[in-house]
Image: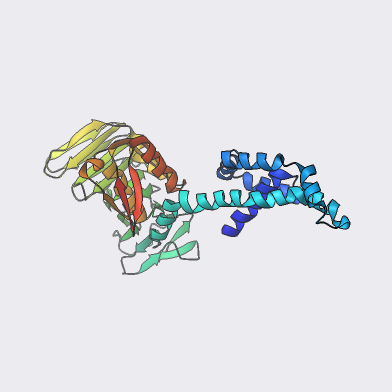
Amino acid sequence: MINEKLLISRLIAKERIEKLSADEHCLLEEWKSVPANAELYYEIINQQSLTQRLEFYENIDHVMTWKQLNRRIKPVKRKLFVRNLSRWAAVLILPIIAGYFIYNFYSDNKFQRFIDRNINFDSKAVLLTDKGETIDLEKIEKSEILVADNITAINSLNQLRYDVSDKENVFPIRQERYFIAKTSRNINGEYSFVLSDGTKVWLNSQTEFKHPVQFWGDERKIYLTGEAQFEVAKDSLRPFIVVTENMEIEVLGTYFNVKTDHLKNLTQATLVEGSVKVKASDTELFLKPGQQAQLELGKKLIIKDVNTMIYTSWVRGIYMFNNEKLLDITTKLHQWYGVDVFFESELIKEIRFTGALDKKEPIDKFIRILEKTSFVKFSIVENALVISK
């Protein structure tokens, strides 16, 4: 990585003094084709210190320099000296640009590098069969795998799709055989499934999903701990039922999100489209699109209107938050990256933010935004993030 930085540094330094060769120009342009690199390039060439140093070299009195050094240089080397003067200037400027590169790499990206060191690289998802077998969905080489007697599944691009079409008589006894899918606790821990009825399920990280290989009977029932998003295949004769520890959600065909949060003792069901019936204790409520059912331990089941994008955007790799406490935001960082977060005071935990975190972006960018908009400071102390005022 450092060799690449130095190479690009040399090309930029040379570009500022003299023309690049065709090959060098192509190499630099290829590097600049990446938006983040282009942004860094223009930031570098606009640096005041670099500009001042360039002006110094450009204003060198070449004639005077030549006269002063004329007696020290043999005649056969004089032309060579004049021709290479600009190259020497480039060599002198190189440390400035290279230093800027390395400073950005080792300073601005310190949080990203810290996060990278602490990411849990366990498998994204494993599948536990009813016979006690464990299938590592991340590491298996074949896309088609045998998951049960005469039942195959296609595992590709972070998705497992059960293939049970035209297999009504696969099992001698028609009983549901439940498998358990578990996703790991890291930023890449998401996985999706297509069930035997065509229902699509997206599992967030750190989620447990118990489901049958093939649905039998007059209902389609699955069990969930964690967070998942469902796009349920319509079947007017067989309702689809999601069972959590404290809540049961019944649908015929719809798109919704379910989340259980043990830290807050909170269960949420958020409806995007269609309609669902939510059961909790002795209460039954119906949701409309744009509504969320909430059940907190020791409290009554309630319904409220919400912006569903805040609760469903994680499927697209974006974590949205609206007036959310810094404590809750950093809890998500802990879940994704497995790093501990400490606060200098209890008051800092209560600071609220509205915004979004794009998983594809370096964590440094997100942390800098938090620092600029709230005047908090993130520091790395040993193996943890510390947040102070």
Residue 206, x across and y down, in percent: 32, 55
In the picture, measured across the screen, residue 67 lies left or right of residue 345, that is right
**Nearer to the camera, 318 or 50:** 50
Q: Residue at x 56, y 51 (%)?
A: 99
Quadrant for the C terminus in the image: top left
| Residue 287 occupies quadrant | top left
**Image color mode:** rainbow
Residue 71, x across and y down, in percent: 82, 54
Q: Is residue 253 visible?
A: no
**Nearer to the camera, 23 or 244:** 23
In the picture, measured across the screen, residue 307 lies left or right of residue 153, that is left
Task: Residue lying at the far bottom in this picture: please name it.
Answer: 132
| Residue 356 occupies quadrant | top left
> How many marks overall?
0
Q: Is residue 387 visible?
A: yes
Quadrant for the N terminus in the image: bottom right
In the picture, measured across the screen, residue 188 lies left or right of residue 208, that is right
Residue 182, x across and y down, in percent: 33, 59
**Nearer to the camera, 204 or 271:** 204
Residue 88, x across and y down, in percent: 72, 51
Q: Residue at x 88, y 57 (%)?
A: 76
